Image (tube, rainbow, N blue to C red):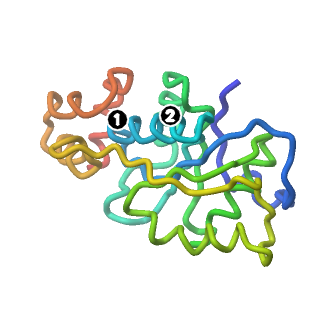
Amino acid sequence: MKHIKLFEQFINEADATQPIEGTEVVVMPGRFQPFHNGHIAALKNAAKMFGKPVIAMQIVSKREESPFPESLILQIGQEVAKNEPEIADFFIYPNSYGKTVIPWFVRFLREQGYETVGVGAGSDRIKAYTPQIKYVTSDKTDTVVHPDFEMKMVDARVEGGPSGTKTREALANDDREAFENMVPKYLYKYYDKLRKYV
């Protein structure tokens, strides 16, 4: 069963520092503001490259590029997880928990019955996450990970393809056609709700 949960509801209880016999997954973090076809392609790439279902981990920030409220993000994340068989689940991770996120992702997902075997990352996150991957796979880690734990670049960007900026611009310009060209059909119904925040 797919569920949508808020990270902070569980983080204080998370003490799962050792691997478990959970469903093996790969996690892909992102801002997904909003989800578009490029994100979906990258999530599918992650599932294919690792040979495991993927967890979409929404990172909420206060940046101008992240205008949509958590309640709407949850609705859209649920819609994506429901419609894409490669996506096992969707969670929100607030930025207030800090920048060292990889160990927290692993521990939190263990609380949900998942064992993270790796991280799928876009090219924009590889540099920031590399030291965290080195730490979590080292002898000094406070969160022991799966022996094959690794990070892979899963970008599915194409020249002239969809982006968060272009999708938000289509919403701001009330260009429904451009919006619908960049998102999966099952997200068309969120057009008016998303427009309220750009």
Q: What amino acid does circle 2 point to?
A: Gln
Whether residue 131 sits left or right of residue 181 in the image: it is right
* Residue 31 placement (x, y as % from top left): 43, 53
In this view, 136 is above or below 145: below
Numbered disc 2: secondary structure: helix
Numbered disc 1: secondary structure: helix
Name the image quarter holding the N terminus.
top right
Q: Nearer the viewer, residue 66 or 102?
A: 102
Q: What amino acid does circle 1 point to?
A: Lys
Residue drawn at x 50%, y 34% as measured from the top left: 75
Q: Nearer the viewer, residue 140 or 194?
A: 140
Residue drawn at x 62%, y 67% as measured from the top left: 133
Whether residue 24 sits left or right of residue 164 in the image: it is right
* Residue 122 placement (x, y as % from top left): 41, 55
Closer to the camera: disc 2 or disc 1? Answer: 2
Q: Nearer the viewer, residue 120 or 1?
A: 120
**Residue behind mark 2:** 75
Residue 98 in view, yes or no: no
* Residue 69 placement (x, y as % from top left): 45, 49
What mark, if any, has residue 10 been given in the picture? none
Label 1: few (<14), some or many (≥20) within 10 Å?
few
**Residue behind mark 1:** 193
**Mark 2 in CB contact with mark 1 (< 8 angstroms):** yes
In the rendered image, which quarter is residue 42 located in?
A: top left
In this view, 16 is above or below 168: below
Residue positioned most to the front: 148
Residue positioned most to the bottom: 140
Q: Nearer the viewer, residue 193 or 15?
A: 15
* Residue 19 placement (x, y as % from top left): 84, 52
Residue 117 in view, yes or no: yes
Residue drawn at x 47%, y 42% as measured from the top left: 73
